[in-house]
Amino acid sequence: MTSEEIRPATAADVPAVKAVTDAAYHHYIERIGVVPVPMEADHAANVAAGRVFVTGDPVAGLVVIEAYDDHLFLDSIAVHPDAHGRGVGRRLLEFVDARACALGLHEVRLYTNVKMWENRKLYPKFGYELVERRVSGPYDRLHYRKRLD
């Protein structure tokens, strides 16, 4: 596999999926005041369900996605800090769009914590529009969508 290929994660990738997710999200704990949801995910179950796709050797980035009847949900995207600036995140977002289209879905949805302000600038650059702000327990989230048709 080349470092740019994106492939389904396997059981052998679970430790790397956890490590990359933790490295990508850990710095947000202090800022948002809680552990980000992706850090508490059941990575083994997500991999077994075919929801996780990875890139890099060793793994440098990943997405966790879930297909619904009318959209593809981008549950998590994580890029290891050591791989920042190499286009890994861009390639992963492009993969998500392509995956949605391949599944016949015309919309991608995601949410991010309002205090992850970097994402508020990033997602609109990739065609996402803000749909709503919703508070769920300790999480204050911005919900985005991207139409692909």
Image: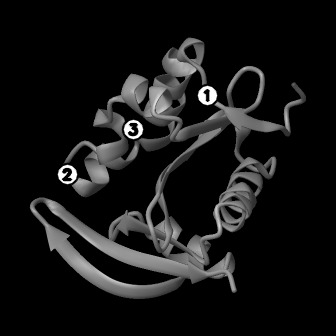
Disc 3 and disc 1: Cα gap in Å?
22 Å
Query: Mark 1 against mark 2, which lies toward the viewer?
Result: 1
Image quadrant assignment for residue 8: top right
Query: Is disc 3 placed on a helix, strand or loop?
Result: loop
| Left or right of 11, for residue 55 | right
| Left or right of 78, for residue 69 | left
Q: Residue sitting at 28 percent across and 82 percent down?
A: 133
Q: Which of the two discs, 3 and 1, labels the residue nearer the N terminus? A: 1
Q: Which of the two discs, 2 and 3, labels the residue nearer the N terminus? A: 3
Along the line of sight, the residue nearer the viewer: 82 or 106: 106
Identify residue type, mark 2: Gly
Q: Which of the two discs, 1 and 2, labels the residue nearer the N terminus? A: 1
Q: Is residue 56 above or below residue 112?
A: above
Q: Is residue 63 above or below residue 43?
A: below
Residue 26 is labelled as: 3
Image quadrant assignment for residue 49: top left
Mark 1: few/some/many CA within 10 Å (<14, 14-19, 20+): many
Q: Residue sitting at 39 percent across and 67 percent down?
A: 111
Identify residue type, mark 3: His
Disc 2 and disc 3: Cα gap in Å?
11 Å
